[in-house]
Amino acid sequence: MRNMYLLSLGLLMALTENTVMTCGPGLNRIRGKCVDENECESITPNICGENAMCTNTNGSYYCHCKGGFTPTHNFTQLDGIKCQDINKCVDGSADCGPNAECFNSEGGYTCTCKSGYISSNGNKTFIAGKGVQCIDRNECNDPSFCGINATCRNTPGAFYCTCAEGFRLKSGETNFTDSEDKPCMSVCDLDKSICGGGTCRNSKDGHECVCTSGFTNYGHKQMKCTELKCNTFISESKSSQASTELTELVSLMTNSCLALSENESVRKERFTQVDGERLLEAFLRALDALLKGGFQGNSHEVSALFNIVESMLKLIGPLLSEGQTKRSATETEVELLVKRGSSPPEGDFSVSTNSTQFASHWDTATGNTYLGFTTAALLSYKDLGNTLNHYFNHLERQKKQKFKINSKVLTATVSNTETANLKKSVTLTFSHLESSNKSHTCVFWDPDLEGGAWSKEGCTTVNSSDVQTVCSCNHLSSFAVLMALYDIGYVYELSLITWVGLPLSLVCLLICIATFYLVRSIQSTRNTIHLHLCISLFIAYFVFLVGIARTENKVGCAVVAGVLHYFFLASFCWMCLEGVQLFRMVVLVFNTTLRPIYMIAAGYGVPAVIVAISASAHSSGYGTNSYCWLNVEGGLIWSFYGPVCAIIIVNVFFFLITIWKLAEKFSSLNPDLNNLRKIKAFTVTAIAQLCVLGIMWVFGCFQFNEDTLAMSYIFTILSSLQGVLMFIMHCWLSKQVREEYAKFLSCICAPQKRKYSEFGSNQTSKSQASKSAQHTGESQI
């Protein structure tokens, strides 16, 4: 009982103690004592959550995130905070160094080297700050990367493979980085047509094309062998063999072509680029020899010349080593461009000489077939235009219009063989030889027009100024720029004056010839000179009247021009002899007459020598398309005007001395007035004759412009009436000649009084003889 009582008392005391004594938060009452509760261990799951660490304190605890997580301050479960991962690769706290990549992981990171690099410690991953770096990996140390027939090229962080010379991939490329399914193969196996008309062989320097007979690669061993049609060159040049001037050029072209097309196994030496330079120099020397002194060929020979030049430029271009070659010779200038490669060149090109330019596109120069090279060439002729200042018959002209070449002639060519109708027009720029605002026309040499002539088909004038003209043409050939000139053409009034005046002059000259030859009373040295002067003028004007416009026959027209040249010069020579005779009469006392043999030699021999030399030097200058006279544009006209000017100057010199001497004699103490008056009259007549004949040809110089019609009227009037003026000065104004005419007419009109006249004439014979002595050769003006 007592034990039960004690037990109940103990329980009551225990309950009373728990009720009276209470512990705070984080503490547990154990055996009457408040003992700390370890929340970090007693609560499951972790009171702080994932990626956090719990730290217990007396009566409490706190949480903090693990390294690599945020936030970084302490917290408890009541704050509702969870630890989040920090991306160190993004915030920059992790620096892996160059050529490395950072990879973030939960609570940390790792560094990995980029492709083509390895870590310096040999591990795949590393942590920054440990002194580890990413260094280049040399893939070329492993021969399996590129395979055979290829070379490995290491680069920082990478590599690439290059096929050996003469090898490439099936795609055509030569560089690659992955050799799987990309072996380098021989180009001879990949492209069976790579050598064209030749055999492909591999060599240490790559592939090599060995050309068969009739094909050539112009000395470039890796270039496709193309057919060289030497037979065409030879057949085209046979037509030129008739011209000895073209022989050297033809021989040079055919021999060079045959040497290039010879089978390489037979040829002693391979052609090299040096041969191209030598061939160009030889070609220019041959052209200089041909063109020196002016090319005298006909239209067929001009066409042959241009054809040879085009063929030679196409032959030489691929042989040259430099991409651009420029040369200047005595008679020509040339520039050549050449492009080589596995693919055709692109873009524009331009070649030029001193006063010409040729511009186009490389695809125009290449054409539809690429031969492994493309060439373009321009050759300009310095003086060929003077020879080709003809052949305008196929050009449309306006009324009174004629043409003159006002630029250097050029030949433009490319390696494209189909240039007769180009898709893209070429541009040609010419500097003018003479600054002029006249109309200019772009023309080319067409060999199909009667053997060769100028034509403007396919060419247009883009723009033209005083100093240059720009042309656009849809074909290639030899080109020039023509300047439009105007002559007086057909003027009815001038024709009327000519057809009325010249016959009248011929009649008057015929009367003068009969007078000087038949009338014995007036015959003297001076009138002998007048006789031959009238004969020369009569023949010249008669030929002029019947043949000046007969241009349909070239040979006949040239003969007419030569005859006119000779007899007009002869008339001036006889006029010069008259000045010499007057000089001798005044200055010399004895031997004042000239011997007939000397006069004939000077009057007819000197013109013959001049005409012979002119015809030998420039025979094509006799006759033009408009008239049968000397060609003004070729310079031959000066073979007439030069001697004429010299004769006029000599005559003026003699006349001045004659007048001076006459003045001295008139002022002397005992002048022979009768004789001096006769010489004075002779001198005045001769000066008047010189003025008429000389001034006429001065006006004749200015007939070659559209604005000189007045000059043409003066020239036509003076030339048409020159015979009339000669008759008036030397016959009609001479008293003695008039008396002879009166006697002649009286005999014709009154024959019944002849006996009486004979009696009267016997009575007066002595006095008549005296008058003849006084009036011999006298002319009163």
Image: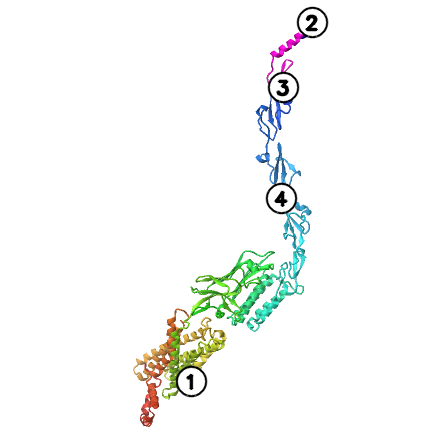
Amino acid type at circle 2 is Arg
Q: Position of residue 244 (x, y in %)?
A: 56, 73
Cα distance, mark 4 to mark 1? 110 Å
Q: Is residue 206 above or below residue 674?
A: above
Q: Which residue is mark 1?
A: 596
Residues marked 3 and 4 touching at CB (< 8 Å): no
Q: Does the stretch in magenta take in 498?
A: no
Of badges 3 and 2, nearer the viewer stands 2
Q: Of label 4 and label 1, which has the lower sequence position?
A: 4
Q: Which residue is mark 2?
A: 2
Dot 2 falls on a residue whose secondary structure is helix
Of badges 3 and 1, nearer the viewer stands 3
Question: Do we see residue 689 in this rendering?
Answer: yes
Q: Which residue is mark 4?
A: 157
Q: Is residue 340 above or below residue 771?
A: above
Amino acid type at circle 4 is Gly
Residue drawn 49% across and 74% down? 620
Q: Quadrant of residue 87?
A: top right
**The N terminus sits in image quarter:** top right
Q: Position of residue 765 (x, y in %)?
A: 33, 92
Of badges 3 and 4, nearer the viewer stands 3
Q: Which mark is residue 170?
A: none
Q: Does the stretch in magenta take in 19?
A: yes
Q: Which residue is mark 3?
A: 37
Q: Nearer the viewer, residue 82 or 298?
A: 82
Cα distance, mark 3 to mark 2? 40 Å
Amino acid type at circle 3 is Glu
Q: Of label 3 and label 4, which has the lower sequence position?
A: 3
Q: Of label 3 and label 2, which has the lower sequence position?
A: 2
